[in-house]
Image (spheres, helix red, strand yellow):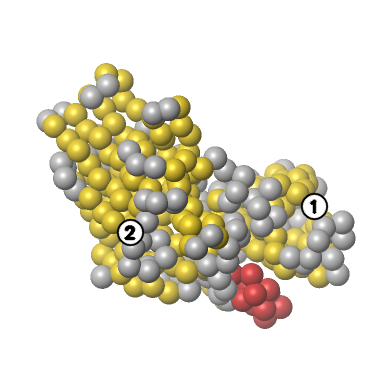
Amino acid sequence: MKQKTSTLSKKITGYSTMAASLLAISNIANGQIVYTDVTPDFVGTGNGASYDLDLNNDGTTDFQVNISSNGADVKLLINASDNNAIAGTSSDPYKYPSLLQANDIIGDALTWVEGNYQTMATSGYFGNPYGDWFGAVDGYMGLRIKVGNDDHYGWARFDVSEDGKTFTVKDYAYESTEDAPIAAGDAGSIGITPVNAIGYKVFAANQSIHLQLKNNLSGDVTITNLLGQRIKLVEINSNAMQINMSDQTPGIYMVTVRQNGEVFTQKVVI
């Protein structure tokens, strides 16, 4: 049974309450994400296994994952129905969904591939193995659905076995605001922050983005707009930083901090 919620489900644990000044920003910035927990996780194994993924839960299948296997040979494919698309690469007639990491920005800036028979993992049929998804653990796939004439971006989280013969669907989410990007793994948390974000505070005030970091170790801060385009890239030189945004139009921006092997993304409203 699937459980739909605009906040994080019980599967995503280890969260703590943010300061009151940040709660209002979080509520404004994250309120449009619709998250679906696949409960229990769907596990497909062997020839004929398939999963119909309805990203916005409107009763219509948006994507279908399926396995074809003949002994040692395997094809793990995903189909994008109608005008929906998957972030990846293509070299006609071959199509390969990209394996994204948590916090990667999913939006217009990515390359989007429409159509069926997109290869997650295949071996045996064409000699060498092809596809990025062999042995993936908590791998994210960038998804784009068409609702009327509007594009909506989302993600789905998968595990794939080393031999490509088993896949697991864990959860997925999409942005209900048209054309708005989403970070891989963003489940629309409202008033809570993940454990790996503890020690980071990011908020907007007076046409600037303010950051309080755990330390001043080397790293960078990326500011991305709603089209997924990088607006600013700033090197970390202090554990208390201020980035001037007076040259940008008012709106929602995504702030990604990369520091000391950690990645943290926060939405802010300018």
| Amino acid carrying mark 1 in the image | Ser
Q: Which residue is mark 1?
A: 238
Query: How far is mark 1 from mark 2, CA to CA?
Result: 48 Å
Say which quadrant the C terminus sits in.
bottom right
Name the residue type under label 2: Thr
Residue 226: % across, % down = 66, 57
Tell me, yes or no, if residue 262 can be seen here. no
Q: Quadrant of residue 260?
A: top right
| x and y, in percent, of residue 252 in the image | 70, 64
Report crowding for label 1: few under 14, some 14 to 19, many 20 or more residues within 10 A (C-alpha).
some
Q: Quadrant of residue 31?
A: bottom right
Percent coordinates x, y for residue 36 in the rendering: 39, 67
Mark 1 or 2: the one toward you: 2
Relative to 248, 226 lies left or right: left
Q: Secondary structure at mark 1?
A: loop
Q: Residue at x 33, y 67 (%)?
A: 59
Q: Residue at x 26, y 70 (%)?
A: 1
Front in this rendered view, residue 3 or 198: 3
Rendering coords of residue 160 (x, y %): 31, 43
In the figure, is residue 216 to the left or right of 41? right
Circle 2 Cα neighbour tier, 10 Å, few/some/many (<14 / 14–19 / ≥20): some
SS label for mark 2: loop
Q: Which residue is mark 2?
A: 61
Query: In front: 90, or 139?
Result: 90
Q: Residue furthest top?
A: 127
Q: In the image as oriented, which residue stretches furthest toward the front?
A: 149
User: Residue lying furthest left in this view?
Assistant: 71
Residue at image x 70%, y 55%? 225
Q: Earlier in the sequence, mark 1 or mark 2?
A: 2
Residue placed at 82% from the left, 58% from the top?
248
Residue 209 seen from this side: yes
